[in-house]
Image: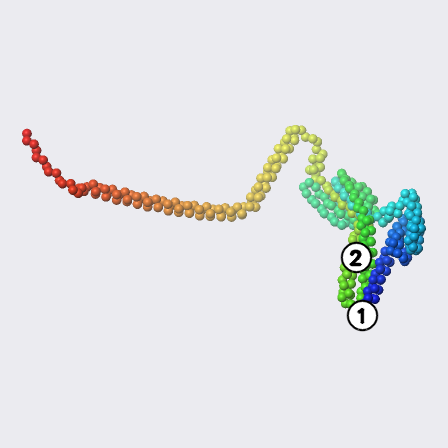
């Protein structure tokens, strides 16, 4: 009995899923007898909605789609009427349903970059802020830079897309010496349509999980459905966040403006006439001397910064040299003592050898008899 009740419950849940899937795919279509008629009714319903919003010439296509959906027979007659309506739309001035869909709900994000050289940076900055307020925009970011060559700042501004062009025209009216301008546009319509479709699918899936949770009888099934529902809801929030970001950037365009005022020396160099050969040579020599003096200055600065390190390294090196010299001196003294000792030993040996030789020479040789003296001869 329990197995039979479980079988009935599973069958009912499968039928409920099939019915919900059929409702979501068909939209406003009626009940269909065959799967082919259901697929055709889904396609025709989508084209019917697009053409109804775009142009009156597509009314024939919408009527044909509704007729095909209500009949549900999928006969060749209905399909022929659908083809005839489609040909009617194509022949009406060459404007098809695809063209209508391409022209609706455009999502464009504009971004402009401007580089402006001005005579008075402070005055130009004030004018820019006033024009931002008049355009009902706001400053998203601001950075200011000061150097020897220029004084400037960069504005990142958000202005309504409806007044984007007029705001750029008003910025060009500010007194300037030079102006560089570039505009870029990004079409995010396809991404937005994809996000809408994903959102509808996720919301439908969310509704199904809620219904499953209401009809769940086991705790394990309830926990599983709750986990899946949490994942789906998280994805829904991510999709909504991306759509809000696109809507915000579509409603408000971005303008990046850089204002800068060159230094007087730079302006004077621009205004100066071409110099003679001697003048250019003297400028080159002066530049070389300036570079050498700058290099010498940096060398002195580096040496001054490294002076403590050099002093410490010098002390360590002096200690090492003193230790090495003392060690060498001790070695030399030891070798000198050894040489003197060897020399004294050699002298003693020579002296001993000489004494023994002299003693040997002074003594008579053994076995030699003394010779007798001969008498003198008579004369």
Q: Residue at x 28, y 44 (%)?
A: 349
Quarter where residue 377 is shown = top left
Q: Residue at x 68, y 43 (%)?
A: 147
Secondary structure found at label 2: helix
Residue 78 coordinates in the image, percent (x, y): 93, 51
**Res 287 visible:** yes
Secondary structure found at label 1: helix
Q: Residue at x 81, y 54 (%)?
A: 198
Q: Residue 315 or 45: which is nearer the viewer? A: 45
Residue neighbourhood size for the residue with mark 2, other residues' Cα within 10 Å, grouped as few (<14), some (14–19), many (≥20): some
- In the image: residue 309, left or right of residue 40: left
- In the image: residue 286, left or right of residue 236: left
Q: Residue 357 or 266: which is nearer the viewer? A: 357
Against 15, residue 67 (above or below) is above
Going from N to C along the chain, the mark reached first, 2 or 1, is: 1
Q: Residue at x 85, y 62 (%)?
A: 15
Q: Residue 124 or 315: which is nearer the viewer? A: 315
Residue neighbourhood size for the residue with mark 1, other residues' Cα within 10 Å, grouped as few (<14), some (14–19), many (≥20): few
Distance CA(mark 2)–CA(mark 1): 38 Å
Q: Which mark is residue 180?
A: none
Query: Which quadrant, please, contains the N terminus?
Result: bottom right
Residue annotated with mark 2: 236
Spot the residue most to the bottom.
1
- In the image: residue 321, left or right of residue 27: left
Residue annotated with mark 1: 2
């Amino acid at each position: 009995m329990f197995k039979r009740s479980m079988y009935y419950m599973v069958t009912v849940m499968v039928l409920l899923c099939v019915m919900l899937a059929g409702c979501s795919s068909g939209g406003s279509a009626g009940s269909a007898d065959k799967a082919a008629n259901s697929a055709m009714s889904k396609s025709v319903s989508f084209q019917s909605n697009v053409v109804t919003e775009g142009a009156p010439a597509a009314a024939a296509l919408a009527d044909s789609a509704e007729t095909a959906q209500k009949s549900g027979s999928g006969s060749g007659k209905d399909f022929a009427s659908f083809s005839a309506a489609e040909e009617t739309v194509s022949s009406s001035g060459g404007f098809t349903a695809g063209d209508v869909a391409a022209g609706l709900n455009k999502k464009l994000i504009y971004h402009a970059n401007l580089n402006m050289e001005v005579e008075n940076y402070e005055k130009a900055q004030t004018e820019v802020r006033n024009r931002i307020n008049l355009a009902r925009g706001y400053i998203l970011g601001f950075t200011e830079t000061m150097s020897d060559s220029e004084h400037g700042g960069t504005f990142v501004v958000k202005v309504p897309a409806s007044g984007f062009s007029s705001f750029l025209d008003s910025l060009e009216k500010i007194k300037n010496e030079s102006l560089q301008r570039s505009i870029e546009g990004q079409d995010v319509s396809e991404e937005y349509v994809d996000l809408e479709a994903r959102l509808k699918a996720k919301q439908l899936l969310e509704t199904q999980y809620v219904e499953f949770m209401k009809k769940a009888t086991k705790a394990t099934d309830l926990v599983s459905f709750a986990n899946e529902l949490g994942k789906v809801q998280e994805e829904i929030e991510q999709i909504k966040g991306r759509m809000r970001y696109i809507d915000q950037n579509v409603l408000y365009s971005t303008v990046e403006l850089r204002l800068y005022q060159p230094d007087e020396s730079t302006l004077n160099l621009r205004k100066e006439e071409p110099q003679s050969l001697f003048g250019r040579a003297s400028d080159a020599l002066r530049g070389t001397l300036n570079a050498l003096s700058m290099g010498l200055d940096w060398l002195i600065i580096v040496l001054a910064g490294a002076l403590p390190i050099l002093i410490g390294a010098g002390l360590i090196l002096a200690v090492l040299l003193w230790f090495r010299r003392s060690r060498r001196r001790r070695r030399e003294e030891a070798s000198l003592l050894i040489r003197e000792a060897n020399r004294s030993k050699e002298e003693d040996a020579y002296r001993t050898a000489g004494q023994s030789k002299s003693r040997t020479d002074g003594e008579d040789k053994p076995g030699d008899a003394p010779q007798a003296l001969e008498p003198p001869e008579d004369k």
